[in-house]
Image (cartoon, rainbow, N blue to C red):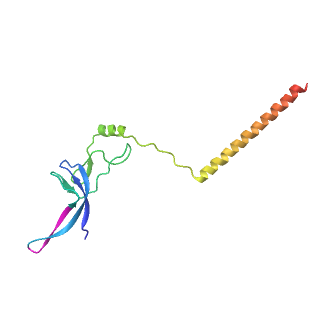
């Protein structure tokens, strides 16, 4: 039998407070039987707080991400309480991060290198042709 579990702590309004470890142990009774007792580790429940056997709510990190902005426990699951206009305002304040292009693969770099070499070769040949044309024109102009 598992003798520990993790639980969320919620306040009186159902808002998430923290995530705790709960140890489960058998407590002997006067009649010789035992009962299971849950002991919260490293945290003391405050008035109005209670344990919920659920993972903490996944919070949004930025616009476009999944999760909650203002979650509450509805008795069986986490639910969003932020209205559409509150969500829109939150997303304006927390824009999505810029997506940086991933580095190119070796094959892509080799292809780009091949293309650049061909372009450089073509430009060099064009430059040589123009120089030859200028030299031929100069010979005709100054030959007379």
Q: Main secondary structure of the magenta part?
A: strand
Total residue callouts: 0
Which residue ends up furthest to the left in the rendered image? 31
Above-or-below relation of 52 to 1:
above
Q: x and y percent of residue 65 in the render?
A: 37, 46
Image-quadrant location for residue 70: top left
Instruction: Specify whether 122 is left or right of 52.
Output: right
Where residue 105 appears, x then y in whole percent? 57, 52
Write the start and end of the magenta stretch as one range.
Answer: 31-39
- In the rendered image, the residue lying farthest to the front is 42
Q: Is residue 38 above or below residue 140?
A: below
Q: Position of residue 142 (x, y in %)?
A: 88, 26
Q: Quadrant of the N terminus?
A: bottom left
Q: Position of residue 64 (x, y in %)?
A: 38, 44
* Residue at screen point 81% across, 35% down: 132
Left or right of 109, for residue 98: left
Does the segment drawn in magenta span residue 132? no
Side of 84 where 119 appears, left or right = right
Q: Work out which quarter of the rendered image holds the C terminus and state it.
A: top right
Residue positioned 72% across, 43% down in the render: 121
Q: Quadrant of residue 4?
A: bottom left
In the image, farthest residue toward the bottom: 32
Outermost top residue: 144
The residue located at (85%, 32%) in the rendering is 136
């Amino acid at each position: 039998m598992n003798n520990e579990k993790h639980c969320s702590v919620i306040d009186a309004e159902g808002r998430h407070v923290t995530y705790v470890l709960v140890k489960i142990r058998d407590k002997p009774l006067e009649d010789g039987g035992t009962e299971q007792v849950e002991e919260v580790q490293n945290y003391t429940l405050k008035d109005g707080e209670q344990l919920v056997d659920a993972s903490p709510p996944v919070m949004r990190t930025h616009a476009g991400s999944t999760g909650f902005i203002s979650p509450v426990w509805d008795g069986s699951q986490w639910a969003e309480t932020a209205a559409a206009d509150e969500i829109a305002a939150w997303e304006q304040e927390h824009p999505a991060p810029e997506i940086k292009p991933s580095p190119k693969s070796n094959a892509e770099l080799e292809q780009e290198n091949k293309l650049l070499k061909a372009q450089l070769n073509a430009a060099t040949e064009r430059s040589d042709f123009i120089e030859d044309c200028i030299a031929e024109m100069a010979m005709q102009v100054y030959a007379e």
